[in-house]
Structure formats: structure tokens, C-alpha cells
Image (cartoon, rainbow, N blue to C red):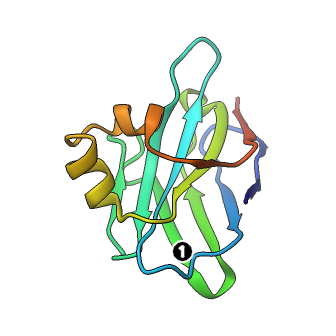
């Protein structure tokens, strides 16, 4: 149901734009997230955006990455600027198509994106590789 695109290789300081097309984003509530996993590391949340328009970011990407949604195109985009080698990872799009991020993260997982990352998103894309050198 989720298909990512836009990954690739870029030099440090460069930019990439990732897109995630969902089968539908027309429900009343949804929480979409971008996650990444580097070799030997746990999957982590990069950014989240929900149907209320509330965005959240990992501290490591604040001010550099921007998440946005185009509901008409069922697309969630992650604009990544000022990339550095620490951003190298496989990037995944994920969704809960029945809850806002507030409900999912705060009320279901006690404010823990880490817990929600492991158990909270029923829909995942196949991933797209981002390499920064």
C-alpha cells in the first residue's frame, strides 16, 4: 500500500527528496512517518505527520528535513537538506490509517516513538536507500 521513491547517492551538504505514495489518505485520521535504519542500528523515526497537520521530527534532523503531505495525490514527501554521512540509511515510509500521530504516539505508546516504531504502524513501504558521502 506504500511505495517510496527518491533515494540515491549524494555528497555531504546536498539534498534529496523522498516521496511515499499511499493507496489512500482519505480517511478522517492518519499518521504517516518516515523512518530510517542504518546497518547494525535500530530503526528510528525521522519525521511524522498526521491528518491534523501536526509534524514532528527527530532532533537529529530538525531544521534540515521537512515532511509534507498532498492528500489529493495520496503522497507524503520528505525534503532532506544539508545531508551528512550520518543520514546514510534505508528510509521507510509507514502509516497508521486509523489514528492521528497524537493518538497513536501519546495515548497508545505513552509518548514513545521508539515503541510505536516497533509495534505501531501496520503499513510499511519497501524502503529506499539514501547514501551520503
Tally of numbered tags: 1
Residue at point 43% right, 80% down?
A: 28
* Left or right of 22, for residue 84: left
Q: Quadrant of the C terminus?
A: top right
Residue at point 54% right, 27% down?
A: 86
**Circle 1 residue:** 69
Q: Quadrant of the N terminus?
A: bottom right
Query: Quick check: 118 above or below 69?
Result: above
Q: Looking at the rendering, which quadrant does residue 95 occupy?
A: bottom right
Query: Quick check: 12 above or below 86?
Result: below
Q: Position of residue 71 (x, y in %)?
A: 57, 82
Residue at point 64% right, 53% down?
A: 15
Of residues 66 and 75, the one drawn nearer to the viewer in this rendering = 75
Of residues 3 and 90, the one drawn nearer to the viewer in this rendering = 3
Q: Position of residue 8 (x, y in %)?
A: 79, 44
Q: Position of residue 49 (x, y in %)?
A: 42, 64
Q: Would you say residue 26 is visible in this rendering? A: yes
Neighbour tally class for label 1: few under 14, some 14-19, many 20 plus, Cα within 10 Å? many
* Left or right of 129, for residue 77: left
Q: Residue furthest top?
A: 40
Residue at point 45% right, 65% down?
A: 98
User: Helix, strand or loop at disc 1?
Assistant: strand
Q: Would you say residue 10 is visible in this rendering? A: no
Q: Looking at the rendering, which quadrant does residue 9 occupy?
A: top right
Of residues 55 and 74, the one drawn nearer to the viewer in this rendering = 74
Amino acid at each position: 500500500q506504500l511505495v517510496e521513491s527518491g533515494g540515491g547517492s549524494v555528497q555531504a551538504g546536498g539534498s534529496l527528496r523522498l516521496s511515499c505514495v499511499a493507496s489512500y489518505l482519505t480517511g478522517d485520521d492518519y499518521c504517516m512517518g518516515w523512518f530510517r535504519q542504518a546497518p547494525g542500528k535500530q530503526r528510528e523515526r525521522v519525521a511524522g505527520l498526521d491528518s491534523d497537520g501536526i509534524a514532528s521530527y527527530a532532533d537529529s534532523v530538525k531544521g534540515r528535513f521537512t515532511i509534507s503531505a498532498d492528500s489529493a495525490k495520496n503522497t507524503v514527501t520528505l525534503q532532506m537538506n544539508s545531508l551528512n554521512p550520518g543520514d546514510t540509511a534505508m528510509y521507510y515510509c509507514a502509516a497508521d490509517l486509523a489514528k492521528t500521530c497524537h493518538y497513536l504516539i501519546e495515548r497508545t505508546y505513552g509518548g514513545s516513538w521508539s515503541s510505536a516504531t516497533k509495534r505501531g504502524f501496520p503499513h510499511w513501504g519497501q524502503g529506499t536507500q539514501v547514501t551520503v558521502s
